[in-house]
Amino acid sequence: MKIKREELGKLRDELEKLTQFIALVERGRLPEFYRYFDAMKNNIEIFICIGCDNTEDIVPVLERDWEASHTMFIGVQDYDVRENNPDADPALCLHFARLLSNVGKYFART
């Protein structure tokens, strides 16, 4: 997979939206996979701040964390927005799926 440097800023922004949504919905008790998304966002921020141009070093790290966020039993695929918030609007599940998809599209390319 090849993510261009110009795309990293957009990916960071999508990760920011995703992590903010999770933090807002969960109100303090963050799911296990959250840390991988946060690490991805922080690693991109560091990469951009130090002015690197070659994404060949950061992409494997991002791929590793993306895969780790999907670990069996504690991964994002087992997350239910309404589990801890049964009164939440069902549309939140769709919103979460869209946010996740916006990040996932960077890793779906071959």
Image (cartoon, rainbow, N blue to C red):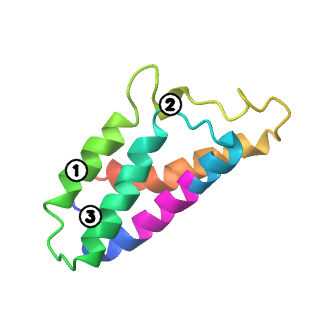
State the residue in front, 77 or 22.
Answer: 22
From the viewer's perspective, is residue 104 above or below residue 10?
above
Q: Position of residue 19 (x, y in %)?
A: 54, 52
Going by the numbered disc 3, the residue's amino acid type is Ile
Please tell me which residue is depicted at 14% across the width and 60% down the height of the picture.
57
Task: Give the number of the mark in front: 1 or 3.
Answer: 1
Asked whether disc 1 touches disc 3, contact meaning CB atoms under 8 Å apart, the reply is no
Please tell me which residue is depicted at 71% across the width and 26% down the height of the picture.
83
Q: Label 2: which residue?
A: 77
Crowding at dot 3, Cα within 10 Å, few <14 / some 14-19 / many 20+, comes out as: some
Could you give the CA–CA distance between mark 1 and mark 2, rounded to whole angstroms? Answer: 20 Å
Q: Is residue 8 in sight in this rendering?
A: yes
- Residue extending farthest to the top is 73
Q: Label 1: which residue?
A: 61
Tell me if residue 15 is in the magenta stretch. yes
Q: Label 3: which residue?
A: 3
Helix, strand or loop at label 3? It is loop
Could you give the CA–CA distance between mark 3 and mark 2, rounded to whole angstroms? Answer: 23 Å
Question: Horizontally, is 33 left or right of 58 in the view?
Answer: right
Helix, strand or loop at label 1? It is helix
Q: Please report the bounds of the magenta region as a residue range.
A: 10-19
Crowding at dot 2, Cα within 10 Å, few <14 / some 14-19 / many 20+, comes out as: some
- Give the tally of numbered discs: 3
When asked about the image quadrant of residue 68, the answer is top left
Which of the two labelled residues, at mark 3 and mark 2, occupies the earlier sequence position?
A: 3
Please tell me which residue is depicted at 54% across the width and 26% down the height of the picture.
78
From the viewer's perspective, is residue 66 above or below residue 49?
above
Going by the numbered disc 1, the residue's amino acid type is Val
Going by the numbered disc 2, the residue's amino acid type is Gln
Q: Main secondary structure of the magenta part?
A: helix
